[in-house]
Image (cartoon, rainbow, N blue to C red):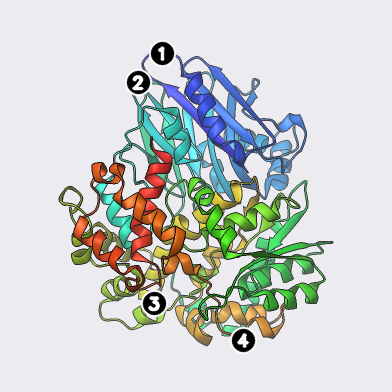
Amino acid sequence: MCGIAGEVRFDGQVPDLGAMARMNECQRQRGPDNGGVFAQGAQAWGHRRLKIMDLSESAQQPMVDPELGLGIVFNGAVYNHPELRRELEAMGYRFFSHGDTEVLLKAYHAWGEDFVQHLNGMFAFAIWERDSGKVVLGRDRLGIKPLYYAEVAGGFRFASTLPALVAAGGVDTSVDPAALNFYLSFHAVVPAPHTLFTGVRKLPPGSLMTIAADGQRTERSFWSLSYPQNAADENRSFEEWTDMLLEGLRAAVRRRLVADVPVGALLSGGVDSSLIVGLMSEAGVQNLRTYNVGFEDVGGEKGNEFEYADIVAREFGTRHERIFVPEAELLTRLPEAVAAMSEPMVSHDCIGFYLLSEAVSRHSKVVQSGQGADEVFGGYHWYPKVADSADPVADYLQAFRDRDFDEYSRVVSAPYQGVDCSGAFVAASFNTPGAADPVDKALRLDTTIMLVDDPVKRVDNMTMAFGLEARVPFLDHELVELAARIPARHKLSHGGKGVLKEAARKVIPAAVIDRPKGYFPVPALKYLQGSVLERVRDALSSRAARERGLFRKDYVDMLLADPMAHITPLRGSKLWQLGLLEWWLQTHVS
């Protein structure tokens, strides 16, 4: 896990090394172990390093191979790098390091841009060719690692975080109207290539961007998720699918144990993280460290699942740590979590992940985490609603979207009203070939879009704020492709995630499977009150907010008059959505 950055010039000028230094410094937390800049001609590359694979200086980045005439900056982890190394060595390649970064360089030289098809892992990278001046940017299939870019006068910049590009300067930070519609409709999800800033874009998951020396850019997708339907898969029994899924999960968890430091686990107490812990133990991990965060019970809402995490920790003999966060500390530290967001994220558990990551990073540099299971295996309540729907697009939007376009038009001022981007986006996704069943259409949208820019981005931002690498086995692309073949009825059985739950029974105690799904909102972010309410009120009434003019005053006043009365279908605060956006903008834009 690291932070990468770069600048490529097309106007005959040299890169701005001051801007490079600012980007690197902005991303220091992502890579606290080391950093460097390499500049040559019209190009400059920056890197902040978190030492996970090959702890020696041989794996330092930016990495240059003068024999091949190639260089790379890379963020992520390629789990099959030992196998690829052996394959490349058999082809005659010689290695000077022992990690995954150099494997990517050699693989690119051997197979060209199609080398990404050989990779199993999470990654964002830039590879440059010394002699041609060509640059190739890439992002992993499921967008686990971020990659933002911006056109600047005479050149092009990229970074692992949006704030790093802003820190470099020369970026148009006006709010993109389409992105604002997405943000307020999809509980802060802004699908690639959009970001909230007009001048910043993000490379879509599973994509490559090629930049020629003269600045010409081409972009292509190297992976897409399809849900094939064939007679063999349809006729396969539920029990057979359960066995196949369990083997796929075992492989995904084993892959994510590849590291030169110990690998721990985030253990929420739910089925997903408990299953990961069980499979890590089964794979032979010794002295496994597990971590669970919990909050105070407030207003009758339970704030932790300590007892379920304890069951799993006892079952597998882990070195378990309960991390209890008093509400006062949670609210005091909230500004830090907002500052750590590459894009504003309204999910209540951002602050929980932030504080959990801080505590975990004192003992571990790598953990496995359970994000993605609900989207991949059908755990959310809207999937049954679309199963037999006459209008699955409308039913998905009704269950998932925070507000319809009529309400959205009452929220934002006239320059931002535009068209119903979110409704059109869902309709276009459902009409894209590759998924015939309405449930599969919803699962594909959630797995490839909503998951990427909500829980996955949240985990990346909050863990990397403390130099902690989080690995997500449920998003192993081979496992996701296997899950896409499983008929929807098997996923929706047993109240959702049926096939996954049955696989889990062979590994973990039934007590953590046969219970209601946990959901722990931070009450002060769901029902705004106290210091958070005052911070939101100040942000929305500030001079900066008035000058920006995003929201209609009558709508803001209505929310402020009764903050607890306006809750989204997915149990979020409508006032928090608006207030967080202004707070984030004021934090990251001078």
Horizontal and vertical percent for residue 365?
A: 71, 49
Distance in Å between CA atoms under marks 4 and 2: 59 Å
Q: Which residue bears the numbered disc 3?
A: 382
Q: Secondary structure at mark 4?
A: loop
At x 55%, y 30%, the residue is 24
| Left or right: 438, with 18 as reference point | left
Horizontal and vertical percent for residue 104?
A: 62, 38
Q: Secondary structure at mark 3?
A: helix
Q: Earlier in the sequence, mark 3 or mark 4?
A: 3
Q: Earlier in the sequence, mark 1 or mark 3?
A: 1
Q: Amino acid at mark 2?
A: Gly
Q: Which residue bears the numbered disc 1?
A: 13
Distance in Å between CA atoms under marks 3 and 2: 47 Å
Picture disc at residue 514: 4
Q: Which residue bears the numbered disc 2?
A: 154
**Which image quarter holds the C terminus?**
top left
